[in-house]
Image: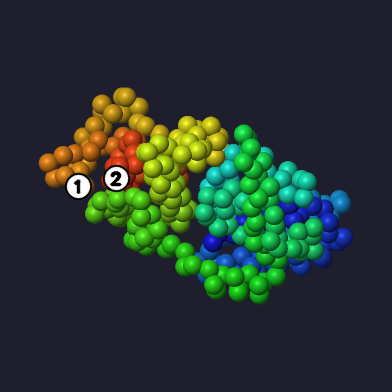
């Protein structure tokens, strides 16, 4: 479970500075509670510019705080983050609404999108606001129909957030833990014994580990999307369109999965050739890869994906063509 500040819970509703100060102090406390459980509270970079009273933005309102409180809030919102748009999954082309309001490009929309693909993201809201309830229901109106109703847990009380975190799974804290979790939760993938070896010596980055796990989950799901005749199902076609073509789901950053260029295949053919996992006298040329942008990590895997062949994960590490 990851946590996002609900940016829509700041909508100019605070009657005075003191009420806003109490509200943001509760959020800062919940941020510290999240840290105690190995989580981070993500915000949006534009949150610092939100309207908190009828006349004052957050940047203006915090000027009335004492220096330590002011520094703590602003360093988080403008410098340290983390910022959820850096790990954003949903595209601005998606149409999501809640209570008749469009929530695309908001933390609610991002949390709903991630929930659909199996990654749980809860919200933290300021109170009092129009968002003092849980769960929050989102309607994802999708191209071609097949709309989805999604629910997201929302927290605005410190003790209730702590209770939720105590019952949540332990977050990934190392590359070794990532490997253990990935192998356990992705039975449709076949990892080589050395798949994760290229990560050794690299500083651990939770956001990158989360992104890698999303890559594995997507491939694991994709591998299961075939009917009894070996034909890709409608869900398989949807995953292909969303993550292998660059049309949706990457916030304008291109496809999550792609083939290497012809020039890269020539220059780095040896580096992208790996021992076959089942046949010792064969090799696998694996230019197809999933991408993490920060830091630049890649997951190389066998292609094409077929119902009667293993989907091999042969390399998880730094971008081969940049080493």
* N-terminal-most mark, 2 or 1: 1
The residue shown at (59%, 70%) is 164
Position in image of residue 85 (x %, y %): 58, 46
Q: Say which element carries label 1.
A: loop
The residue shown at (62%, 51%) is 112
Position in image of residue 40 (x %, y %): 55, 61
**Where on the picture, by quarter, is residue 284?**
top left
Residue 212 horizontal side relative to residue 38, left or right: left
Residue ID for mark 1:
278
Q: Is residue 203 visible?
A: no
**Where on the picture, by quarter, is residue 291?**
top left
- Closer to the camera in the image, 316 or 321: 316
Q: Is residue 128 visible?
A: yes
- Closer to the camera in the image, 232 or 217: 232
Residue ID for mark 2:
310
Q: Say which element carries label 2.
A: loop
């Amino acid at each position: 479970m990851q946590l996002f500040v609900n940016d829509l819970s700041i909508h100019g509703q605070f009657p005075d500075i003191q009420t806003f100060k109490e509200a943001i102090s509760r959020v800062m406390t919940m941020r510290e509670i999240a840290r105690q459980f190995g989580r981070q509270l993500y915000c949006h970079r534009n949150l610092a510019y939100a309207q908190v009273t009828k006349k004052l933005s957050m940047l203006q309102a915090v000027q009335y705080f004492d220096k330590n409180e002011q520094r703590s809030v602003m360093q988080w919102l403008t410098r340290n983050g983390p910022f959820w748009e850096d790990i954003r999954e949903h595209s601005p082309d998606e149409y999501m609404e809640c209570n008749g309001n469009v929530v695309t490009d908001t933390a609610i929309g991002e949390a709903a999108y991630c929930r659909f693909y199996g990654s749980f993201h809860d919200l933290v809201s300021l109170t009092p606001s129009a968002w003092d309830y849980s769960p929050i229901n989102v309607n994802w109106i999708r191209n071609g129909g097949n709309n989805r109703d999604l629910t997201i847990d929302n927290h605005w009380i410190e003790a209730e957030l702590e209770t939720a975190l105590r019952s949540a799974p332990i977050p990934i804290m190392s590359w070794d833990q990532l490997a253990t979790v990935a192998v356990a939760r992705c039975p449709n993938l076949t990892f080589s014994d050395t798949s994760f070896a290229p990560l050794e010596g690299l500083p651990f980055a939770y956001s990158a580990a989360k992104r890698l796990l999303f890559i594995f989950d997507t491939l694991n799901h994709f591998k299961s999307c075939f009917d009894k005749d070996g034909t890709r199902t409608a869900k398989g076609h949807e995953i292909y369109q969303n993550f292998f073509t660059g049309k949706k789901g990457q916030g304008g950053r291109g496809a999550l999965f792609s083939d290497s260029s012809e020039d890269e295949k020539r220059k780095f053919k040896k580096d992208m050739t790996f021992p076959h996992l089942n046949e010792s006298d064969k090799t696998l040329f694996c230019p197809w890869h999933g991408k993490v942008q920060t830091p630049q990590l890649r997951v190389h895997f066998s292609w094409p994906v077929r119902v009667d062949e293993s989907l091999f994960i042969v390399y998880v590490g730094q971008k081969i063509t940049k080493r």
